[in-house]
Amino acid sequence: MAGLAAMGGSLWAADTNAPAALTPEQRFEGGTNTYTNWVDFTAGGALVSGNRAQFQQQHQLPAGAFGGVGDFHYQNDIATNTTLTLDGRAIAEEHDYKLALGIQKEKVGFLRLSYEQSRTWSDGDGGLFPGSGQYYAAGDNPLALDRGKLSLEAGWTPDTGPKVTFKYTHSFRDGAEGSTDWGYAHPAGSVLALGLSPTLEQINEHSDSFQVNVTDHIKATDVGLGVRYERGSMDDALKITEYPGEPVQQKITDRQGTTYDLLNLHSFTETWVKTNVMVSTGFSYSGVGNEMSASRIYGNDFDVGYVPAAAAGFGYYGLTGTSRQHDYVFDLNLFYKPAPHFTVVPSLRVDREDWNGSSSGIETLGLDSPVPFTSDSSRGLVDVRERLDLNYNGLTNWAFYGRGDFTESDGNLNQDGGLLPVAGIGFPAVQEQTDDRRFFQKYSAGARWYPSRAATLDFGGYYKLNHYHYGDGLDSTTNSPASANEYPNFLAMQDFETYDANLRLTLRPWQNVTAVSRYEYQISTIHTEPDPASGLSEVESARMTSHIIAEDVSWIPWSRLSLQAGLNYVLSDTHTPASDVTQAILTAQNNYWTVNFTSGLVLDERTDLSLSYFYYISGDYNNNSPMGVPYGAGSEEHAVTATLTRRLSQSLRLALKYGYYRYDDAAYGGNRDFGVNLVSASLRYRF
């Protein structure tokens, strides 16, 4: 019996050779194998009803089918301590491409070559005239802007001694994007309306930059030196269609061309004087030279030469000019820890900026004879910024911080020339010299308190005052009430003042529940004082009041289920004296709220499901078109997504995603509304 019992005991004893149970992370990844390489194949499509261009602008996705390689990564040791890496991405219709090759040898250096390109979309439509409901659309397709970068990096990075890195980068932007610099139109019910007809910005920009950095550690000091040179060109143009669909329609091409050279020299040091004292310094010099050309030409098409026309407004051609800027920056920082729980960090930053520019061109108006004009300007500015940071955590369950930030500036601006009257129409050229002084101050303080293990309270606030003072040494324009041209030296002083208080409470009433509540109150005012010659006194020209309320709750009721919900509510308005005397200008509202919800559910050992919902609404649009221009956002958006992930094997994973998006915009009379069904699938293979 004893032998039988012993035999039975061995039959039912645990098998010590059985593999160890998988951890949750291993179960999610599909096994114990660690894969360093993978490739994702992605395909999908968006079925859009409504404004396709607005959908693509908001979600930066193509309206239609897309697919390709979403992500690729390969790495391998090709020699001792030497690793080869290859990364890539190629999504057709998204115009999203990337290819990067790198070789790194430990304690020796690295070499990297990469190219990436992406596309952004924008809605090129114009505006809505509420009186008649006329909408100025640019077309069904969005405007597309491609941007890309080719770079080559190399580095010598031994364990000891100097480290040297080199980088060459070629960047570009090419395409078009929408602009809100809209043109004139004659909608039904209006004699003339500003800012309705659509405008696009044609962009063609290229740059090449070379950068070398050297760093070293000398005794207790880290030191670095660097140089960067960049050369680029920009050939951009605003293309405005005025009076679209009308008998007398005209095109405006506002072209701006620039070529530039930039040289930057920079250095830094970091020294631990003692174990509780560290001093750091930095210096940077930048010099930029520009050569510019520009024109603003009216015609029956874009990109045409200048031809006098009776309907043409103010324009110019043959504008050329040069400018040069020098910028010197020095900063000094001290980290001091006089006690174990107390740190003091004072810092100083000095910035000197000088620039000058000159230009000349030919001004045009209608059929009148063109008039030559010239302009010269220069600017000098010195900024001195002092900052002090204090941190203390010597009290149990408490942490305190305080900060003072001050900036003092002295500058001058000289302007001479500019556009001239044509046939007696327009304002004369300006001659002005302005000395300006600025003083910025900001004081911040706050604390964190841990009253219990289940609660954390953060509270604080700040006060900020930015003061601008302008003194006129020379002004060819008069600021008297009878003048029709009071600028540019009309203002003598402006103050921007802000009070802010904020509070955040984090509660963990149970181990699987976390709630975060946030509230912030902010009030900002702008005080403006005109030139005494205007006969006007100082006035509070704007007052903005904001309340920001937010709540986030996360709950894990079950090991397989997680839930998270959030609410953000913002109440904000900006009041100006003009709204007290006319209904044409209303108090500006920026009130909105958002709701978001996400959940994750483990269906079984191989399958996961995630769901999310997002809602946004802003009801600030006020159609006061009989009295003035209606402003304010009036949009509503819903977004629902569901993603199902299935681990087919240790190396193969499939993900299916469905999304529904709905957007309504009252400010554009429903012309920018859209509804979208989005379906995508991705298959990841790891090896």
Image (cartoon, rainbow, N blue to C red):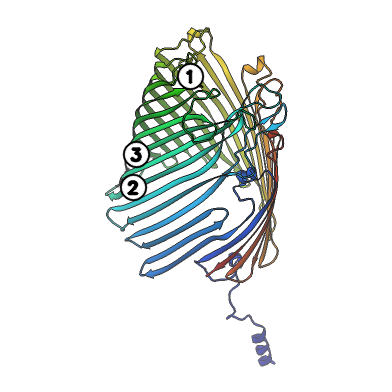
Residue in the image at 46% along x and 20% along y:
468
Seen from the viewer's position, the closer of residues 116 and 419 is: 419
Residue in the image at 70% along x and 64% along y:
603
Seen from the viewer's position, the closer of residues 49 and 39 is: 49
| CA distance for labels 1 and 3 | 41 Å
Mark nearer the N terminus (3 vs 2)? 2
Q: Residue 507 location, x and y as percent?
A: 65, 45
Q: Residue 243 location, x and y as percent?
A: 61, 29
Q: Residues within 10 Å of mark 1 (few under 14, many from 20)?
A: few
Seen from the viewer's position, the closer of residues 270 and 4 is: 270
Tag of residue 262:
3
| CA distance for labels 2 and 1 | 51 Å
Q: Residue 670 location, x and y as percent?
A: 72, 37
Tag of residue 312:
none
Q: Residue 122 location, x and y as percent?
A: 58, 42
- Which amino acid type is marked by label 1? Asp
Residue of label 1: 368
